[in-house]
Image (cartoon, rainbow, N blue to C red):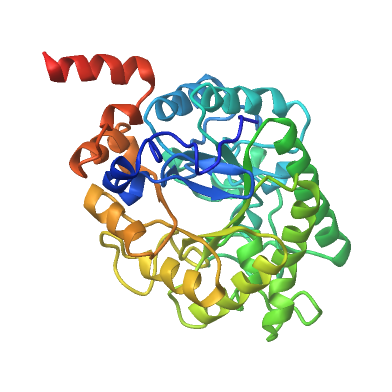
Amino acid sequence: MIDKVSTTDAKDDDRDAGAAGQIPMLFRPFSLRGVTFGNRIVVTPMCQYSADDGYAVDWHFAHHGRFSLAGVGAAVVEATGVTRDGRITPGCLGIYEDGHIEGLSRITAIYHEQRIPVGIQLAHAGRKASAAVPLQGAAPLVDCDPSNAWQAVAPSAIALADSWPVPHALAESDIEGIIEAFGKAAERAVESGFDFVEIHGAHGYLIHSFLAPLSNRRQDHWGGDSLENRMRFALRIAEKIRGILPEDMPLFYRTSAVDGVDGGVTIDETIALAAELRKRGVDIMDCSSGGISGPSGRALVPPSPGYLVPYAKQVKEAASIPTMAVGLIIEPQQAEAIIAEGSADLVAMGRQLLDDPNFPFHAAQALGHPDPFSILPASYGFFLSRRKLS
């Protein structure tokens, strides 16, 4: 884990009162528990579908090395399966064996070399598991590669779509076993050197499918019409992980704030969930949408720049919990406004950083940061500043 810094001695913030006043809000530090993010730009989890039996490979190290030199405030490693059968595809990262720790530790070391906090998203794919990687069509493996397929699980025996296989409905003992698997994964995350953990409770994967009435038709205390019952799985996992993480280690939760389909999760239900998660030690809600019966990221409105930000704002205000906004955040002024107006506390970016890994530096320039070169590693910033002065 990296050495922690407080908001009072974080880079650039308190050189003097005048200089601090000029620093854009996007580049002001933000603290959760014992971790301070040097700025508000976060690398969102992006599945690379390149793992070898759950193990990180050279592609992962190059992928994260690229962002570690970009001046981001933090990064989150992609959805990582807490069980072998909880992976989305055969190419997904895993954290279900102790052997995975070595490769994950290499990723944390890449970020820590630049004093950037890094987290990992712990996930179980549920009824979306056992799929081909997207570059090969993302179809159920049972149809396109049956020799490598495995049994998907869910709260109820309801298929994702007509063309998908019916998942196995989890028994009580199965549910308890998966909660334990999340706990073991959290232990491995700590051992791997991560600075925070994110629970993946969005996009139609297992935790989300327990919350969503469309996919949870159970008649026991894990589901049914009762929101209290449908929240139980998420809350038990949060309790389990919070009890394992060190006190100074933040816990994130990614949610699909709305399902965007009739009978799906509503913003009011997400606010209720967020309030209960906060009581159990979750520190920030990462607000995405959709995925329960279609593509992730779909909401009640068509995708457009910042289209999911209102959900982060609603959750932040109604549940009294910090939030991280996502959803086509692509312009410096847009990202600055989200933070400055209090809509969210962090902004997470994926494709924009793939397109422009130096977005933080370019944003600092565009927003009039008094020393934009300080956003970059010293070796980069020094030579770029010399180019400016020549």
Q: Is residue 331 left or right of residue 63?
A: left
Q: Is residue 358 left or right of residue 195?
A: left
**Residue drawn 66% across the image and 67% down it:** 277
**Is residue 312 or residue 134 the one in the foreground?**
312
Q: Is residue 30 above or below residue 92?
A: below
Residue 271 image offset from top left, x and y in percent: 55, 75
Residue 182 image offset from top left, x and y in percent: 75, 49
Q: Is residue 65 visible?
A: yes
**Residue drawn 51% across the image and 23% down it:** 61
**Is residue 215 or residue 362 the one in the foreground?**
362
Q: Quadrant of the C terminus?
A: top left
Residue 353 image offset from top left, x and y in percent: 34, 38
**Is residue 388 or residue 158 the one in the foreground?**
388
Q: Is residue 383 left or right of residue 236?
A: left
Q: Quadrant of residue 165?
A: bottom right
Q: Quadrant of residue 189?
A: top right
Q: Is residue 265 visible?
A: no
Q: How many marks?
A: 0
